[in-house]
Image: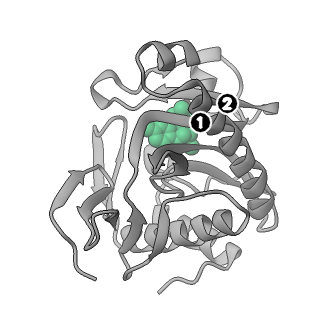
Amino acid sequence: MSRGEQIYKGKAKIVYAGEDPDTLVLHFKDDTSAFDGEKVEQLASKGKVNNQFNAFIMEHLQAAGVPTHFLHLINDTDSLVRRLDMIPVECVVRNRAAGSLSRRLGVEEGLILEPPVFEFFLKNDALHDPMINTSHILSFGWASEDEIHAMRRWSLRVNMLLTALFAAADLILVDFKLEFGRYEGELFLGDEFSPDGCRLWDAKTLEKMDKDRFRRNLGGVVEAYVEVARRLGVPLS
Ligand code: C5P
């Protein structure tokens, strides 16, 4: 399986054309960024860990009936996915207050959110990914009403599935971000699911096991990702 031309260079991934025009190769880099790319560092093995972590989660979701773009692992750092027409919107689900929600609404980190909070953000680095609502999505034509409903429904379904998966590994799924796209008129989960795009706390100690370790200079970033993978039974090479 060879990579074709580079299609997109993101902060943590490079996307290449696949051999078949309907596919893409996701290459997971060791680069780790935060604060809209203001803080960037290379963390050895992170690309490999996230690639294998993402494969495990995507296969778990697929087995539970969630349509995802994931096809298969290619090697340690690369995965083959279906090529989607991406919707430029980020879907965030929150089970506990943290991060931008705590800052925006002045609520204490850790507050349990029941029912979970669901938010849309515009995927736009230059504008710092502003929060948007369904009215913006419709008026600017980013997605249809049906797609908005489907993104919300699948995000909440993913939350139920992954909250249970992580709870069985003594981890609290605090929040996460998903992105969706279209393939042959259907909505698919795209992008990745890794500790770079979610918050995970140890259920007993509430220790942070996700990218907040990097954002807050806590150290042991990849070690925490590896520990999460170990607890879930993710096979790491
Ligand atoms: O920063 P905020 O609290 O809004 O992030 C909510 C969740 O979404 C976190 O788990 C964060 O890692 C994830 N996120 C992301 N990519 C973004 C924005 C948020 O993965 N561009």
Coordinates of residue 93 in the picture (x, y in percent): 66, 37
Q: Is residue 217 left or right of residue 56?
A: left
Q: CA distance from mark 2 to mark 1?
A: 6 Å
Amino acid at circle 1: Val
Spot occupied by residue 77 in the image (x, y as percentages of width and height): 35, 75
**Kind of residue sitting beneath label 2:** Phe
In the foreground, 84 or 33: 84
CB at mark 1 closer than 8 A to ligand 1?
Answer: yes
Q: Position of residue 219 (x, y in %)?
A: 46, 58
- 155 to the left or right of 5: right
Instruction: Give above or below for 21 relative to 33.
Output: below
Where residue 39 sits, quadrant-wise, is: top left
Check disc 1 and report its element: helix, strand or loop: strand
Q: Is residue 171 above or below residue 115?
A: below
**Residue 216 visible from this viewpoint:** no
Q: Position of residue 60 (x, y in %)?
A: 67, 68
Secondary structure under tag 2 reads strand
Q: Residue at x 81, y 57 (%)?
A: 204
Residue to which mark 2 is pinned: 118
Residue under the image location 70 percent in, 61 percent down: 65
Could you tell me which quadrant the N terminus lies in? bottom left
Q: Nearer the viewer, residue 50 or 18?
A: 18
Label 1 belongs to which residue? 92
Residue with the most extreme front position: 184
Q: Do residues under tags 2 and 1 come within 8 Å of each other at their CB atoms?
A: yes
Q: Left or right: 12 with respect to 182?
A: left
